Every structure is written in structure tokens, then in C-alpha cells.
Image (cartoon, rainbow, N blue to C red):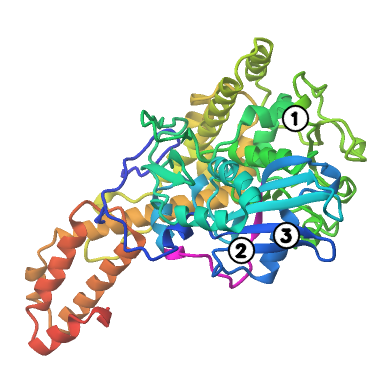
């Protein structure tokens, strides 16, 4: 059989596609738009409340609804008491009908990005640098302002590093500095996965590499710099410190992994937006390399346009992960099935008394003790080894980066053990290569049969790669009903269909088309040309994973067939829009 399975842990090389290495012709602001939609400054007005004071570049478009969302999400709740500088991130729905910059151009980069780093269709991320300092000259007694980067890209570590560089200077020098920073960003190379990128910004140089879907999961290609001009080398563009985020609840990490895997409704109650957003991002990333396919909000407020939809008691809580800080949510969301209460992470030096899972009825206020409040019974037996390993690390004062690496590796191996049997089964749905005929439509994939898949688990289940015991079958049954399975399977199905199309195209190119058309009437030949042109256009549009030279060869076939036709037809068929 033809195995496409990019089983988690098995990596395929990048497809050799017909594409020029140089970047397409870029207009002013195109490079900026490939990284950011816009930059906003949100201030506090005594009469108006929070208001967007500046949008840069000035031609950037945001609907009134989007501006309102940005306003409320860019400031911590008043009870958070964030004095000084605070960084966090949020995610909000793109308004219906609003366009993000340069969509089609960015599809090119999305193809090679890992699933967790593909651009978010229908959502924007907001990366916030909020400053609150006492200022007696102001009526309110405080200076409060946020610099916010709005982007489609989930590069949280990168954008927070960028904000650390530009926000403090912006607060000193105001708009001319912002304009100069935007002009620097518009000279950056585009965010192409797999390339080492050097990004100068206001006299500082950042160096980084965006991962690709062909990288081996769990490895990071170190970006080294002997260049004295490079000021900051980023080891990752998107990963948060898992150990720091899960430290307050780390006795329950395996249960939290199950809840995220199954797209269960989860709420994180935290003292500040920084802690709520980091924890939500850590939860979403703990099932990597699987993509979390439900909605998640790293910071969610009562002003959010989805507030009513997500807090209604008339239906079951939606499949979403919310990060909140307002005490009001302790009351509004107490009917939610799974609640994670995070204390102040700064005081997390000692292990909180978090061993037992707490009953939901005990969660009355946001002052409740940190812990996980749920009635959920995990499918898998608890892995005591990882808990002991991390506890030992705390006692021995192991560096946080090492603890983070241990936890990330644990989650990766757990997810891979779970996903490999699915990858193996889905690869078996692929037709045999010999069934592909150039003169028939590409064969169809066999449908996914749940019971047939379950039978494969007896001999080729997760027990081959994981020592964990428990009800794996029950976990799979629940997963197959979740949005995460739906999203994963759609993606794999699309990849396999494209592979079939590519093989079909390659088979066509190997045919002697001149010999074939000798038996054709003129009408049939014209029909063949139109069909081949359509296939070529579609292959270029979908960036099919064909062998090098396939598309030029097909183009040459088309040209030679056209030349066998009368001149008047040649003229018509050479017009670019005749396909």
C-alpha cells in the first residue's frame, strides 16, 4: 500500500514544488502585513472609558465591533491590580465580512507550517503590553495605556519579545517612534517556515527560525549566532513555559491532557491576564503535534461579544477553553464541568496542597483555593513517574528550562502514543497505487470505519509505545466524537486527496498524449486541452506535492497538443482565460 501516514514521530521531507526561491514582488506594507494586521494604542478616557487612540498603519481596517473587542481585552480587570508593566495575549473573532491583509499571499507560508502554527482562520490574536503607573498630573491619578499588536500568527513568544523592545520606548517617545518601528517591520523578510530570519528593529537585531511541518516533533533547530550585530536569539517563536504554567496544578497534568484532547469545556480562573493567558496557551499546546480545534480565549472578559453565548445555562457549556480574572465568573461559570483555579504563580515555590481533585460545589468564589474542580474520571491510570521526576526537580532546584523540557517531552510522547494508531489506520484507507489510471478520475479513499479502527487497537494500539494502562478504548471512543478528531481527520483526508491528485497528474505526464489524440476528434482534443489546463491551474493553486518537473512537463504536453490543432483554435486556446 501507498503509505502517506505522517505518523506522529515520522517526518516526511518537504515536497519538491515548482516554485521560485525569490519572494514575489512586494508592495509597501506587504511585508508588514505578512507579520501583523495592525498595531493599536488603547488608552483610558475618563468620559469614554477605554478607547483606541491610534491604529497604525493608518490605512489598516478594523470594524467597530473589532475595535470594541480590542478596547476591553487590552486592559486587565480592575481587580487584577496590575501596577507597572504587564504582558498578556488575547484572541477574538474576526468580524464577518472583514478582510485580513494579504490572505492569499500568506497561504503559501501556511502550507509548510506545523498545524499548531497555521494562521487562525476567523480569529485574530492580540499581544498586549500594558503600563499602569501613578501620575498625579492626571485626573484619575494613574497613567494607563496598552500597546497592542494584532496578528493572525500565534507566535506568542516572538511577539512578546518584540513588545518588550518597542513598548517601553513607545511610552517615552510616542507616535514618531511607532511609525519608525513599523517602517522597520516593513523591511523584514516574510515569515517563511524553515528559514533563519534576521529581523532588525529600532537598532536591535532579532534572529529566529519558524518551525516547519517537516521538523521532527519535539526537536528544535537551534539558531546560533556568532554575529556581534545580533542582539536577541529566540530559541522558539511560540512555546510557553509549560512547567511554570502547570506548576500550581501539576499533580493533575495527565487529566488536563485528557480534557484538552477531548475538547471539554474548561475555564481557567487566575489572578491576572498574564497568568490566565499563559495557562490557556499551555493547555492548548499540551496536545501538540495535534492541533486544538475548538475555540479558546487566553483572556476573556464580561464585555466580550461571546459572553452571553458562552455563559448561558440553557444549554451545555460549549467546547471552549476560557481564561478569566474577574470574580464575577466564579458565579457565572460555576455550572461549568471543569474549572482550574490558579493562585499567584509568583508564590508557587512550594507545592500547593493540590493533590486531590476538588468537588465543584466547593467553588463558590474566586478566593477558593488553587486546584482543579471537576467530577471527571480520567480514562488512563495516573502516571506517577512523571510526578516524581518533576517533584525531584523542584527539590534539587533543577532549572525551569529543564523541567519545561521534561514536561514537553512527556506530553509529546503521550500524544504520539495516542495518535500513531490513528495515523496507521488512516494510511490504510489509501487506495493501491496500481489502481490509479491516467484516464479515469483518481480513486476515492475508503471511509473511516470506527469499529474497524477499534479492532486494529488489539494488536497495534498505544500499548506498543506507552507503558500507561487504563481504558484507552474508552478514550478513543470519546475522542472520535470531539472537534479535535474532526479537525485532524479533515486535514489528513485533504492531504491524502491531494496526494492522489498528485499521483494522477504524474501518471498523466508519463502518457504519450500525442499518440492518444491521433484517435481523437477535434472536439475531443479541445476538450482534453481544457481539462489538462484546468488540472494544471488547480495543481498550482493547491500546491500539490508533485515530483519536480511534473508541472512544466504537463505544460509542454498542453502546448504540443494545441499545435496539432487548426490555427484559429490555437489562438483561442492560447488565451489565458480559456480554462
Q: Is residue 138 visible?
A: yes
What is the spatial separation of the Cα atoms under label 1 and label 3, in whole angstroms?
26 Å
Asked if residue 468 lies in the magenta stretch, the reply is no
Q: How many marks?
A: 3
The residues colored magenta run 89-104
Of callouts 2 and 1, which one flags the residue occurring earlier in the amino acid sequence? 2
- Label number found at residue 140: none
Residue at mark 2 = 55
Task: Measuring from the top left, give residue 322's x and y in whole percent.
Answer: 73, 48
Task: Measuring from the top left, give residue 201's x and y in whole percent.
Answer: 47, 46
Residue at mark 3 = 71
Task: Measuring from the top left, give residue 163's x and y in whole percent.
Answer: 59, 45
Task: Please give left or right for residue 168 compared with residue 269 in the image.
Answer: left
Of callouts 3 and 2, which one flags the residue occurring earlier in the amino acid sequence? 2
Residue at mark 1 = 345
Q: In this view, does 511 lie above or below 561?
A: above
Q: Tell me the mark number nearer the camera, choosing from 2 and 1.
A: 2
What is the spatial separation of the Cα atoms under label 2 and label 1, in whole angstroms?
33 Å
For the residues bearing labels 3 and 2, Cβ distance under 8 angstroms = no
At a point 17% along the width and 67% down the height, the residue shown is 555
Task: Measuring from the top left, give residue 300's x and y in whole percent.
Answer: 75, 51
Amino acid at each position: 500500500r501507498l503509505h502517506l501516514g505522517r505518523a506522529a514521530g515520522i517526518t516526511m521531507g518537504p515536497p519538491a514544488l515548482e516554485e521560485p526561491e525569490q519572494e514575489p514582488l512586494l508592495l509597501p506594507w506587504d511585508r508588514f502585513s505578512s507579520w501583523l494586521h495592525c498595531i493599536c494604542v488603547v488608552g483610558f478616557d475618563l468620559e469614554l472609558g477605554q478607547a483606541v487612540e491610534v491604529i497604525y498603519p493608518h490605512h489598516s481596517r478594523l470594524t467597530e465591533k473589532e475595535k470594541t473587542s480590542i478596547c476591553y481585552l487590552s486592559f486587565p480587570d480592575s481587580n487584577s491590580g496590575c501596577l507597572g508593566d504587564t504582558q498578556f495575549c488575547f484572541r477574538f473573532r474576526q468580524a464577518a465580512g472583514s478582510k485580513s491583509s494579504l490572505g492569499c499571499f500568506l497561504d503559501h507560508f501556511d502550507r509548510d507550517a506545523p498545524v499548531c502554527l497555521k494562521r487562525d482562520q476567523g480569529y485574530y490574536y492580540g499581544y498586549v503590553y500594558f503600563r499602569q503607573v501613578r501620575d498625579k498630573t492626571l485626573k484619575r491619578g494613574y497613567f494607563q495605556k496598552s500597546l497592542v499588536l494584532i496578528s493572525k500568527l500565534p507566535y506568542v513568544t516572538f511577539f512578546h519579545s518584540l513588545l518588550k523592545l518597542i513598548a517601553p520606548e513607545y511610552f517615552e517617545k510616542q507616535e514618531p517612534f511607532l511609525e519608525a518601528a513599523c517602517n522597520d517591520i516593513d523591511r523584514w523578510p516574510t515569515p517563511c517556515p524553515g528559514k533563519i530570519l534576521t529581523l532588525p528593529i529600532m537598532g536591535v537585531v532579532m534572529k529566529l527560525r519558524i518551525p516547519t511541518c517537516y521538523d521532527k516533533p519535539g526537536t528544535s533547530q537551534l539558531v546560533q549566532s556568532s554575529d556581534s550585530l545580533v542582539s536577541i536569539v529566540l530559541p522558539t517563536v511560540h512555546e510557553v513555559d509549560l512547567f511554570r504554567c502547570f506548576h500550581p496544578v501539576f499533580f493533575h497534568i495527565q487529566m488536563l491532557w485528557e480534557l484538552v484532547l477531548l475538547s471539554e469545556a474548561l475555564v481557567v480562573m487566575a489572578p491576572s491576564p498574564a497568568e490566565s493567558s499563559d495557562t490557556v496557551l499551555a493547555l492548548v499546546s499540551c496536545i501538540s503535534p495535534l492541533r486544538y480545534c475548538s475555540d479558546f480565549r487566553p483572556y476573556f472578559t464580561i464585555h466580550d461579544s461571546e459572553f452571553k453565548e458562552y455563559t448561558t445555562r440553557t444549554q451545555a457549556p460549549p467546547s471552549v477553553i476560557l481564561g478569566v480574572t474577574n470574580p464575577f465568573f466564579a458565579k457565572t461559570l460555576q455550572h461549568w464541568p471543569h474549572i482550574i483555579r490558579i493562585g499567584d504563580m509568583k508564590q508557587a515555590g512550594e507545592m500547593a496542597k493540590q493533590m486531590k481533585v476538588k468537588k465543584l460545589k466547593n467553588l463558590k468564589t474566586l478566593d477558593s483555593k488553587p486546584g482543579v474542580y471537576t467530577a471527571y474520571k480520567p480514562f488512563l491510570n495516573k502516571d506517577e513517574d512523571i510526578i516524581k521526576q518533576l517533584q525531584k526537580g523542584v527539590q534539587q532546584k533543577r532549572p525551569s528550562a529543564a523541567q519545561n523540557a521534561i514536561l514537553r517531552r512527556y506530553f509529546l510522547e503521550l500524544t504520539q502514543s495516542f495518535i500513531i494508531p490513528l495515523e496507521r489506520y488512516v494510511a490504510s484507507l489509501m487506495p493501491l497505487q496500481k489502481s490509479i489510471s491516467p484516464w479515469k478520475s483518481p480513486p476515492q479513499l475508503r471511509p473511516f470505519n470506527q469499529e474497524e479502527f477499534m479492532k486494529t487497537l488489539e494488536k497495534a494500539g498505544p500499548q506498543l509505545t506507552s507503558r500507561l494502562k487504563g481504558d484507552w478504548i474508552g478514550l478513543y471512543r470519546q475522542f472520535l466524537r470531539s472537534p479535535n478528531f474532526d479537525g485532524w481527520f479533515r486535514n489528513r483526508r485533504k492531504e491524502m486527496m491531494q496526494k492522489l491528485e498528485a499521483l494522477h497528474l504524474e501518471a498523466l505526464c508519463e502518457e504519450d498524449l500525442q499518440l492518444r489524440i491521433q484517435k481523437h476528434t477535434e472536439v475531443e482534443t479541445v476538450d482534453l486541452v481544457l481539462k489538462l489546463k484546468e488540472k494544471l491551474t488547480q495543481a498550482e493553486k493547491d500546491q500539490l506535492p508533485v515530483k519536480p518537473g511534473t508541472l512544466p512537463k504537463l505544460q509542454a504536453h498542453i502546448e504540443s497538443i494545441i499545435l496539432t490543432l487548426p490555427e484559429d483554435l490555437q489562438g483561442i486556446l492560447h488565451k489565458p482565460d480559456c480554462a
